Amino acid sequence: MNPPTLSSLQVYGFCVLGVVVSVVLPILRKMLPTQGVAAVGSVWAAVKPYVVIGFFSFVVGVLVVALGGDAVKQWNWQTAVLAGYAWDSTLQKLGT
């Protein structure tokens, strides 16, 4: 039995979910408790680069879905999440 096909909008949504996971994981890692309580300014300083990267990753998600053409119609939600995660991870590595 074939899994149900996703619309391009659903694929984009799952790509965005992958981007969100890729952006949130490093933020949570940096926010792990240390000896002192972090001030709001230092939290924003830690989060800001990931917010900027995340924004551009959403644009990349649109491009991935748009350039994927008919192949995107064959993706399941797991493939879309992994594609979004991979693209954002790649952008983060290129940005550092």
Image: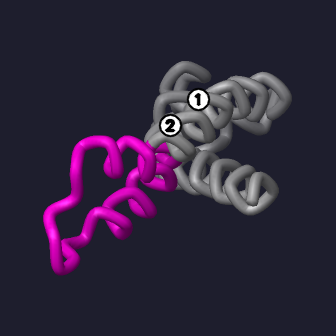
Name the residue type under label 1.
Phe
The residue at the point 49 percent across, 40 percent down is 48
Q: In this rendered view, identify the residue nearer to me: 77 or 58.
A: 58
Q: Secondary structure at mark 1?
A: helix
Dominant SS in magenta: helix
- Density class for disc 1 (Cα within 10 Å; few <14, some 14-19, many ≥20) is some
- The type of colouring in the image is one colour
Would residue 56 be visible to someone looking at this image?
A: yes
Point out residue 20 in the picture as x, y percentages from the top left corner: 44, 44
**Magenta residue span:** 18-47
Asked if residue 17 is positioned above or below residue 32 in the image, the reply reads above
- Density class for disc 2 (Cα within 10 Å; few <14, some 14-19, many ≥20) is some
Q: In this rendered view, identify the residue nearer to me: 26 or 67.
A: 26
**In the rendered view, does 19 fall on the left or right side of 38?**
right
Furthest-bottom residue in this view: 35
**In the rendered view, does 86 fall on the left or right side of 69?**
left
**In the rendered view, does 66 fall on the left or right side of 75?**
right
Q: Which mark is residue 55?
A: 1
Q: Are marks 1 and 2 in contact (CB under 8 Å)?
A: yes
The residue at the point 22 percent across, 77 percent down is 34
Name the residue type under label 2.
Val
Q: Secondary structure at mark 2?
A: helix
User: Residue tagged by mark 2?
Assistant: 51
